[in-house]
Image: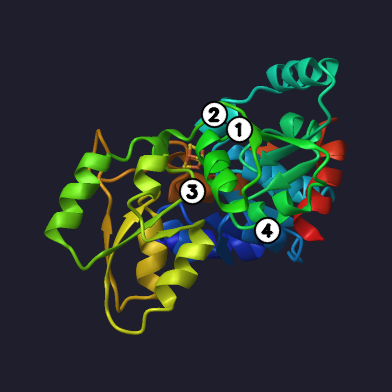
Amino acid sequence: MIDLVEEISHLKKQKQATILAHYYQEGEIQELADFTGDSLKLARAATQVETPVIVFCGVHFMAETAKMLNPEKQVLLPDLQAGCSLADSCPANKLARFQEMLRENGRKLHTVTYINSSAAVKALSDWIVTSGNAEEIIRRVPAEYEILFAPDRHLGQYLQEVTGRKMILWNGSCMVHEIFSVGDLLKVKKQMPRALTIAHPECPANIREHSDFVGGTEGMLKYVGGFKEPMDFLVATEANMMWQLESKFSRHRYHPVPGITCACNKCPHMARNTLEKLRDCLAAGRPEITWQPEFGKAREVLQRSLLN
Ligand code: SF4
């Protein structure tokens, strides 16, 4: 393991690469990264990178986003198969047909799309949001337009609640956040009545209802950081987030909210990236995300939504 870490550090220098890692990556990968963050923070960080090579330790749509924002850089993803169940729940051809059907019925709409989506879906959108900026963008959409929100119905429901803006919701979801068990959460809350529950807005309403704080991963860090005395937190998001919480605010104790099928929810797509694959992709300069025709339109939407 020490050899592997040294090898990666050496290759990183030799290949002039910058490593970006999402909070849902294993701690050993986050530890090696130059930047860690949620999707919004990493998309913005990608535009600050000075080296010619970016290695994106996350899933495919995130690496695509980094490439769109940095067309001249080489963007590598340790495992090209690292996908996302949420992005897969909204194929571009189906979204295009649905938009067409709504417009044929005389509906004037803006499509607001969560960043967890393919480049082709982003290219069909008016706005791209992350859990960190979604409220702000939704408030920007002129009142005379209806909003079609894709692909996460749970995040969409949550945004309807906080903004008071009714939206047409695409019926997609994240396999990791959908399987938290409200029964098990209530059991743990009984055992630890003083613990606070923090939940990602991709969680279903029955989990959010029993939470003290709902927000994206950056929001969670800010929230727990505000407590000066040691606390217990029940965490309803991908289990690797606990590593980031523990490393930034070690005075607190963190407990994963159990899922229906297992004690901790890890994203199988994120887990495809390993230290070995990170080393191999640095050494070989692949797998690489190459520029696709739809990237141009998607880039315009991304820039308008995330960088301005
Ligand atoms: S945690 Fe959910 S939304 Fe995030 S990459 Fe995995 S499947 Fe997609």
Residue 184 x, y percent position in the rendering: 20, 43
Give the residue number, with chain letter if any, for mark 2: 172
Query: Is residue 297 or residue 284 the one in the foreground?
Result: 297
Mark pair 1, 3: CA separation? 13 Å
Q: Amino acid at mark 1?
A: Pro
Give the residue number, with chain letter if any, for mark 1: 151
Query: Is residue 228 or residue 106 the one in the foreground?
Result: 106
- The quarter of the rendered structure image containing the C terminus is bottom right
**Residue at the location (35% across, 55% down)?**
211
**Residue at the location (83% across, 52% down)?**
304
Q: Amino acid at mark 3?
A: Pro
Label 4's element? loop
Task: Give whichever of discs 1 and 4 has the lower sequence position.
Answer: 4
Mark pair 2, 3: CA separation? 13 Å
Residue 142 x, y percent position in the rendering: 82, 47
Q: Amino acid at mark 4?
A: Lys
Label 2's element? loop
Q: Is residue 223 above or below residue 153?
A: below
Do residues under tags 2 and 4 come within 8 Å of each other at their CB atoms? no
Look at discs 1 and 4 and give the one toward the viewer. 1
**Residue at the location (28% across, 50% down)?**
257
Mark pair 1, 4: CA separation? 37 Å
- Mark 2 residue crowding within 10 angstroms, few (<14) / some (14–19) / many (20+): some
Task: Give whichever of discs 2 and 3 has the lower sequence position.
Answer: 2
Task: Give whichever of discs 3 and 4 has the lower sequence position.
Answer: 4
Give the residue number, with chain letter if any, for mark 3: 201
Which image quadrant is residue 205 in?
top left
Give the residue number, with chain letter if any, for mark 4: 15
